[in-house]
Image (spheres, rainbow, N blue to C red):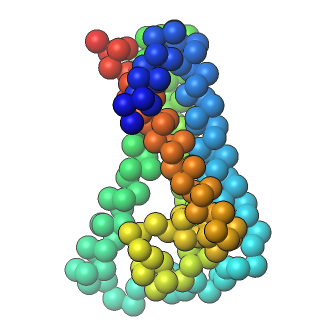
Amino acid sequence: AILLVAALSWINSRGLKAGAAVQNLLGFAKISALAGLIVFGLASAKGNWSHFQPMLPETVTVGVLAAFAVALSKALFAYDSWNVVTFVAEETQDPARTLPRALFLGTLGVTVIYTLATGVYLYILPVEQAAAVPDQRIAAEVAQILFGPVGLSLIALAVLVSTAGCDKISSFFPGQTA
């Protein structure tokens, strides 16, 4: 972890273009991993559309609402940092035009990608089986069903890339806002 932070800090010190290139590469890799899981999941015959039934619970109880709230709290991490584009607004060309566009398209993109990924998870795993997955590693379970044992390695790699991207952003912005 220390080496990753040191390497990313060094890249950031090389300038905005070097930092942006690495961030774009990490972002592209993360989106590609999710897109691959979505495409292979939807194309797979290993899922079943009946897993989406019933769409809503028969009754809405405090327990259902609590479960929904817990599920939403996990999903919020996927949308974390949607607003970080505002930290470099003064460094963009025509920020009055590009900033709202970046916020809208970024939020829309994340919403579409994670909604599709969640749909694939439900398509492949029935709710009861998903609830029993150890440590709630749903993506790893789905990848293992789709790709066999190599699926776990692919998800582990995707998590590493995603973590590196998050660390890259975290190490970049303190220097920009100081």
Q: Nearer the viewer, residue 4 or 52?
A: 4
Residue 97 visible in this rendered orientation of the protein: no
Whole-percent x, y for residue 171 in the image: 38, 24
Q: In which quarter of the image is the C terminus?
A: top left
Residue 1 in sight: yes
- The x, y position of residue 5, in whole percent, is 40, 28
**Residue name at image x 42 percent, y 81 percent:** 132
Name the side, left or right, on which 98 lies relative to 59. right
Task: Please give the count of numbered marks on the rendered protein.
Answer: 0
Residue at the spot 49% in from the left edge and 35% down from the top edge? 165
| 29, 79: nearer the viewer | 29
Relative to 58, is 43 above or below?
Answer: above
Specify the farthest residue to the front: 3
Q: Quadrant of the N terminus?
A: top left
In which quadrant of the rendered view does residue 23 lie?
top right
Give the x, y percent position of residue 113: 59, 52
Q: To which quarter of the image does residue 93 belong?
A: top right
The residue lying furthest to the bottom in this view is 58
As drawn, 15 above or below 154 = above
At x 44%, y 50%, the residue is 78
Give the answer, above or below, for where 157 lies relative to 146: above
Q: Residue at x 54, y 54 (%)?
A: 156
Residue 32 left/right relative to 134: right
Of 65 and 46, the residue lying toward us: 46
